Structure formats: C-alpha cells, structure tokens
Amino acid sequence: MYNVVWMDVETEKSILVLLTNRFNKWWNNQNVFVPEFRRRDFKYLVKKLEEPKAITLIGPRQVGKTTVVMQIIRELIEQKKVPPKRIFYVQFDDVELRVLSKNNLLLDVLSIYQKYVLLEDLNLVNSEVYLFFDEVQRVDDWAEHVKALLAVNSNIRVLATGSAGFSISQKSKETLPGRQELFAMFPLKFIDAVALYCSKNACSLNANLLSVAGYELRAGFEAALAKKSFKEFFESCKKKYLDFAPNEAEMNAAITRYFSKGGYPEIVITDDPSSCQKLLKSYANDVIVKDLMPWFRIRDFPTAEKLLFLLASLSGAQMNVTELLKRLPGANAQTINKYISYFESLSIMGKVPVYTGSKLGSSKHPKTYFLDAGLRNAILGVIDAPIQDIEKGHLAETVAYDHLLRLAYKLNSSSRASISCVNQKKGEVDFVVELPRYAMKLPIEIKFRKNTANLKGFYEFTGTRMGIIITENQLDLKGNVLFLPMWMFLIMC
C-alpha cells in the first residue's frame, strides 16, 4: 500500500467520516450540487485531466477554483462514467481534519482512502484514479508526494489548487518539471461575467452568440497579425458591430457593471452594492491575513493594508516608491518593493515597465494596474459611486490591461507576455505588447471617453507599425491603426 502511515483505529475512522460526509459525498451515491454556469476554463481542464500529469491550479481567493473542481468531479461521474470511489477530494485547510492528523496530512488521507474506500494499492491501480487536492499549500512537501504518485503509476490523475500562487508555482516548478501543467485562474473575463450575469437575470445579450463572436474575432485578429494588415479583420469587425448593434444599450450596461464590480463570480451575481463592497473588502483582507502573513512571514498588517489602498488609487498611473514612502511613515523602500512583489505573485496587481527598446524595459517608475476593477473599487470604497468620465478612463485601462495579459498569453502560445508602456516628451502609449510569434511589438492605446485627436505620441511611436486604439464605441481603420470598441476588444480576449 502507498506510504502507509500508522494511526490508531479511532483516528482513522474519524478522518474517514470527515472524508466521506464532508468532502466525498458521491461515495455514498449522493449527487454533486454545483452551479450550472461553467467558465470557459472548465473544458480545458477536463481535457488536460486525460494526461498523466499533475494540474496545478493557482489563483486569487474566491475566483472559483473549488467550484470548477466540483464541476469536473460531476462531469467525471455523470458524463465520463468514472466510478465514484475512484474520485478523491480533500480540502487541506479544513481545521478539524488538520487537528485529527498526527503526521503528514496528505499521507494520512491517502492511506485511509486506499485502505477503506479504494480497496487497492495506489501504486498498482490498473485504471484511472482521480485525486483532487484543494488548498495544497497547507501541506509540507506536497509536490514531492505528488511526484512520487505520478512516478509509480500512469493511471493516477492529480489536480491541486491553491491561493498562495507564488509558493505553489515555485515549488511545483522545482519538484515537478515536465510532470505538471501550471494553470492560473483569475476573476471572470468580461465575456464570462456577462454569461454568468445573464444566467441569473433577464438579459437581451445572447451569451452563446457573444462567445462564438469572440472566438471568431480572435481568429481573425491572429490572421491579421500574421499578414501584418488589419484590412480583412476590419471588415469582419464591421459585420460583428452590425450584428450586435441592437444590443448596444445592454452592452454598455454590461461594461459599466464590469467596470464597477469586476469579475469575482459571487460579486457578478450580487446586486446589492454594499454587499459587494463588504465581500470584496473581506477578499482583500484575506489576501493579507491568510496569504501574505503566513506564507511570506509578513507581520505589519497596517502597512500592507495602507500600501494596498495606495496601489489601488494608482491603478493606471506610474508608481514612485519615494512618493509612496511619504504616505507610509516607518516603512522603507526595501519593504515596500517586497510587499509589492508579493501582491504581484498573488495575482492582485501587475506592473508595466517603461519601454526602452530592450526586451524587459525600465523598471524605474512603472505603471501599476489592479487585475480586477471591482477589487480596486472596493478597497477605495467607491464600488457604488457613479463613475465619472475621468474615472472611466482609469477603469478602462485597468480592465484592458487584465484582458491584454490573457490575450497576449494566447497569442504567445501560452508564454507570459512582455508588456511595457511608452513615456516620452512627445507623448505616451499605454501598452506595447511583445509578440515574438509574429515578430512584432504592438502598441495599444486606451481612449475611452477621451479625445481621440490627441494621439501625437501614439502615432509618433507607431510609425509604420500596426497599432490599436481602444475606444468607447468607435470602429474605424486609419492606415495601419485600428480603432476598436472596448466591448469588441474584451470579447476576443
């Protein structure tokens, strides 16, 4: 039997009861109740589970990792006809389970599972067994144990999730090279947020048609990049623009809603602004208390909280550590930079360096962006405030940055994109995306509710390059520069 761990019978039975009644009710032929709405990550993850590799699913708290895992388990039982007792699930942050375990918690639960439920040695199983480990960062040496499981039997399938993204990804990269698929899950993209909202509310937008349009637009965009011309893609965009013209008011309302509330699933379907504010604030506090403090050994909660507020207020602006220090008495530059790197690793925010012509750009005074507009608004206490025109510009940049990261990841064949910004005397460019696959640097400017005539810096930098200007609702092609409505850009990401 796999790594048998000695426990007294009473402890074994207590853990077995927990595993059966709290985490694996399907062992007793009970149904798996999960939301019907499935984000587009779902099909990808189900497909990847067919491979004899570990899937390591990381992302911020409350983005829906556990929900997706439960949906996968339901799919395995109901559609793939996997025997329920060949599916094991456990949450390693469960307090009662941690109290009962006297050894390594992962080894304890697996020992009990194979002894009382599977009735087979995990080393010797001759058909697939699915192991789902939730909040795996709470287990010491988890990656080593997963590596051992995969090494002895190709019929073992493992999906591990966790919120402490940096610690999990670093550990899995070091211990599971070639044996794992690292997948990051973020708050819902605009198109998924629309689909979830419309599944719960009366909505004139057809989420399925919107999804198909998004796939077609991205395919056309990729073809345009390959041909170094937007002409054919522009014609496709005009057709999509006309197709959705009757839904313009609903589309604008969806964008306003997304700018205000962001993409955390529970927030998308919560109507009351004060409830959204409280939930998102609790998410932000959990980042500090449950991730930053235990995993990065942060002890100064007030400084971390104040810094998160200041970074939220700077989303879309250049960051100057010297200026931040004036607002954080008692802190030093080393501490501030360290905290910021931790927030980045937890997928709360990102930095955009200044373009210098080099691959990485200059790290001096980078622009910063929150990865979720709703979280940013809740931290600032403005989630229910009317959005002013100037604020719409900041939020448009924030949302565009998050979606651009996802789009560039796909365009670069699942490699993280290099994104920088231009800050010159002649003007600025919000984003310059490195696309090695197409041998180009693509400049992108956000002119949401702004005068699109003021683009001297953009045209100066773009020159003969292809470029994109994301607008509130303008679709046009001027030379090699495509003016693209925000909604159209978001659905193709």
Image: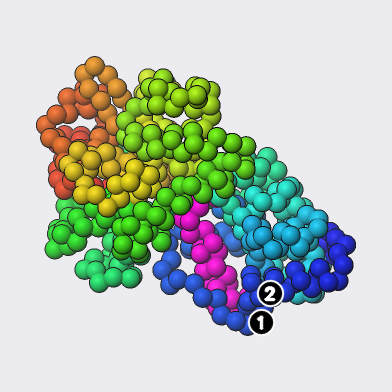
Q: Earlier in the sequence, mark 2 or mark 1?
A: 2
Where residue 20 is drawn, which disc sits there? 2
Provide residue 374's location: percent of width, then percent of height.
35, 50
Residue 374: within the magenta?
Answer: no
Residues at circles 2 and 1 in contact by the CB criterion of under 8 Å = yes
Provide residue 412's location: percent of width, then percent of height.
44, 41
Magenta-drawn segment: 58-83
Quick one: SS at disc 1?
A: helix
Q: Hey, which quadrant is residue 104 in on the image?
A: bottom right
Outermost residue on the top side: it is 425
Between the residue at mark 2 and the residue at mark 1, the CA separation in whole angstroms equals 8 Å
Provide residue 405's location: percent of width, then percent of height.
40, 42
Q: Hey, which quadrant is residue 298 in on the image?
A: top right
| Mark 1 crowdedness (10 Å alpha carbons): few <14, some 14-19, many ≥20 | few
Nearest the viewer among 125 and 428 is 428
Provide residue 488's location: percent of width, then percent of height.
24, 51
Q: Is residue 83 left or right of residue 426?
A: right
Q: Amino acid at mark 2?
A: Thr
Q: Is residue 40 left or right of residue 136?
A: left
At a point 67% along the width and 78% down the height, the residue shown is: 27
- Measured along the vertical axis of the image, is residue 282 above or below residue 122? above
Nearest the viewer among 131 and 98 is 98
Q: Amino acid at mark 1?
A: Asn
At a point 26% along the width and 67% down the height, the residue shown is: 206
Nearest the viewer among 43 and 453 is 453
Q: Is residue 118 visible?
A: no
- Measured along the vertical axis of the image, is residue 220 above or below residue 119? above
Outermost residue on the bottom side: it is 29
Q: Is residue 153 left or right of residue 55?
A: right
Residue topped by disc 1 = 28
